[in-house]
Each structure stands twice: as C-alpha cells, then as structure tokens.
Amino acid sequence: MAEVLQYDQDVQFDYGNKKISCKCVRVTTQTYGFASEYLESMVSLYHSTMPHIPTEDIRTSLQQDGVTHIVLLRLEADVRQEYFEKPVRLLRRYTQSQKQFEDFSDDSDPDEDIGTDLLLKCEDFIKNRKKTQYEKLIKQRFPGLIERCSNERPDLDLIDAARIQLRTRDLIIGSLSFATKTLDDFPPTKVTHLLHFGVRTRFQLMKAGRRLLQTAVSESKNDVFFVFSPSQTVRFFRNSGFTDDPLICGRFQILSDSVDCVPMAKILNRIDQPVQNNWEVYRNEAYKRYSQEAFFVKKLIEENNELKMKNGKYEKIQNTFEQQLALERSRCVMYEQLVQSLENQLLANGIKPKVNQDEIIQKVVKSIK
C-alpha cells in the first residue's frame, strides 16, 4: 500500500537516479487565492491527461462548492536549479502566445539541446531589440516572450532562472480533485467522488499518483470512494483496491452521464458490520434485478431473431417479384421493338398498316397477365 502524504511537509521521491523534494498541499474552492494560483494550473494538467474533456467543463467542475483538491508541488529552489541546468524548460513557457491555452502536452525534452544557445539569443534580443539579428527567430519560436517584453526597459528577469517569477504550473507535479455526494436510496451511502486526477508525464515513474490517491482515500470519512476511470487507468485503480464489479458500481452511474469510462468503487475498510451487511443485501438485490433484466433481454433477442427470419422471407419474396417484373418488362420492350420492325418493313414495301401499335402492345401485355 502506498504511503500517505503529509500536508505542508517536505517529502522526497525517487526520480531516476536522484531524489526530488516535494510538498503536498490541500486546498478547496474557498481557499484564498485558489482561482489565481491553482485553478488554471489544474485545468491544464487535467486536460493534458484527459484531452477529450473540454477545458471549460473541467474549470466549471473544479469551481463547484465543496470540491477538495490535493496538490503535489515541487520546491521552488529545485525548479530554479532545473531552469539553470536546462534553460530550454524555462523558455518553454514562451512558446505560446499569452492568449493561447497552455497545457502540459509537451512535457518532455525532444532533443538533447539544453537550450543554452537559445537563452543567449533571447538575452541578446532583450538587450538589443532594435539591433538584434535574432528578432525573427524569437518571434517564430517564442511569441510569448515578445508579448511580455517591455519597450521601455530590459526584461532580463523573464529569462533569469534565479529571478523569474514562478507560477503554480511550474511547480505542480500532480493533483486530484474530489467531492462528497450522498445517495439516499438503499443503503444510504456517502460517496467520495473522484472528479479529476492527473500527474505530469515525466513525473509518473515517481509513483506520485498512488500516494496522492492513497492520501485522498485515507482522508475520506465516507462509505465509498468512487471514480469513472478511462480504460487506460482501470489497471491502476484495480491495483489500488478498486473494483469494477457492475453489481456494485452500477449504482453510482447516476453521478455522471459518462458513457466512455468504467465505473469503479472502493468500499472503505472503516465500514462497520451492519453497513457491510447492507452492502451484501444490496448486492443480492442487484443480482436479482440483473437476472430479471437478463431474462428480459434474452426474450427480446429471441423475438428480434424471429423477426429477422420473417423479414428474410419477405425480402426473398420481394426479390423474386422484382426479378419477374424485370423479366416481363424486358419482354414488353422486345415485343415493342418487334412491332416497330414489322411496321417499318410494311412501310418500306409501300403498305400502310391499319393496326394500331399501342393496341397490339396492350393485347400482348394482357395475354401475358
């Protein structure tokens, strides 16, 4: 079982061949500065892990009353040291315009260039904006830096690892957000609903996600911890003690209209025996309902197969009729051509026929019928 994180205390994780220090904080929608410090960072993080969910939907769900967020942050000193060693990560914040949505989709270094040369070019641009030869390069690669630079004074703080103003999104490693819901049907249940959960790609090997989840589960005082899991994380939640048993999890489907995720639940160990017995009763009742529905579906399938067989017979009769109709039509065309040919021969020999062509065709068709 993963170790529970302690709030507002430094904790170390194994990150490759070195240690990385972090701090876990607990915030709510009502926390002072939540909207300005944490909200957009978490929207970016969750959207990078769940790109199928619109950012506005994520933002709205995070701002609901009663939502709690557990956030794992790096220490500022470590981030500044990383920026000093790899300036490319500092410059990455300027690759997009300020008006564009910034996410964590590009969370790795695609090449071995640590960005030292680029940093020097950016510095030259800031110092000598009217004379620099790198203006075109900077505009192309770092439009955000162009927007942030002031024409009145040099803005070297923008690219200085020691003095740059760090944002929450620069520090965040992972976070999860959950809310408490109450189901009043049998048995009455308080549910901790995990709304969003994400860890930045390059920090996932630290197993920070397991510790974040375990912290939230340990903190919950409710009966059940529930999540709608994308298919790619089902195994992760199973290894964390969750079940996707439809007889249990189907009850919580009403918490969301999600149809492309797997409902998964963890019945917390602190449930007392009477409540546990209620869950057994609920499971038995759910199985009975499932059996009734399965029998009903079976009958529907049988009736559907019978209708398909009848429909097949009707289609066969219709095909035969259409084939016969096509044959008779071709005969009519042949007779019409024959009459026309005879009429032309008579006219060629100076004989004008007194027989009406339409009358002949009608007689032929009538004889066929």
Image (cartoon, rainbow, N blue to C red):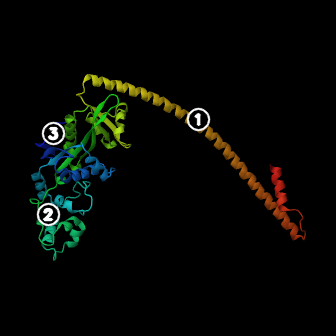
* In-image side of 325 versus 22 (left or right): right
Quarter-of-image position of residue 305: top right
- Please tell me whether residue 85 is drawn above or below residue 313 in the rendered image: below
Looking at the rendered structure, the kind of residue marked 2 is: Leu
Out of 237 and 303, give the one closest to the viewer: 303
Q: Secondary structure at mark 3?
A: loop
> Which residue in the structure is indicated by mark 1?
306
> Which residue in the structure is indicated by mark 3?
5
Q: N-terminal of the two: label 2 or label 3?
A: 3
Q: N-terminal of the two: label 3 or label 1?
A: 3
CA separation in Å, label 1 and label 2: 73 Å
* In-image side of 185 versus 137 (left or right): right
CA separation in Å, label 2 and label 3: 34 Å
Q: Dot 1, how many residues are within 10 Å of its Cα: few (below 14), some (14-19), or many (20+)?
A: few
Residue 204 is situated, as x and y percent measured from the top left of the image, at: 22, 46
Looking at the rendered structure, the kind of residue marked 1 is: Glu
Residue 48 is situated, as x and y percent measured from the top left of the image, at: 27, 51
Q: Secondary structure at mark 2?
A: helix
* In-image side of 151 versus 193 (left or right): left
> Which residue in the structure is indicated by mark 2?
158
Residue 282 is situated, as x and y percent measured from the top left of the image, at: 35, 26
- Please tell me whether residue 14 is drawn above or below residue 362 in the rendered image: above
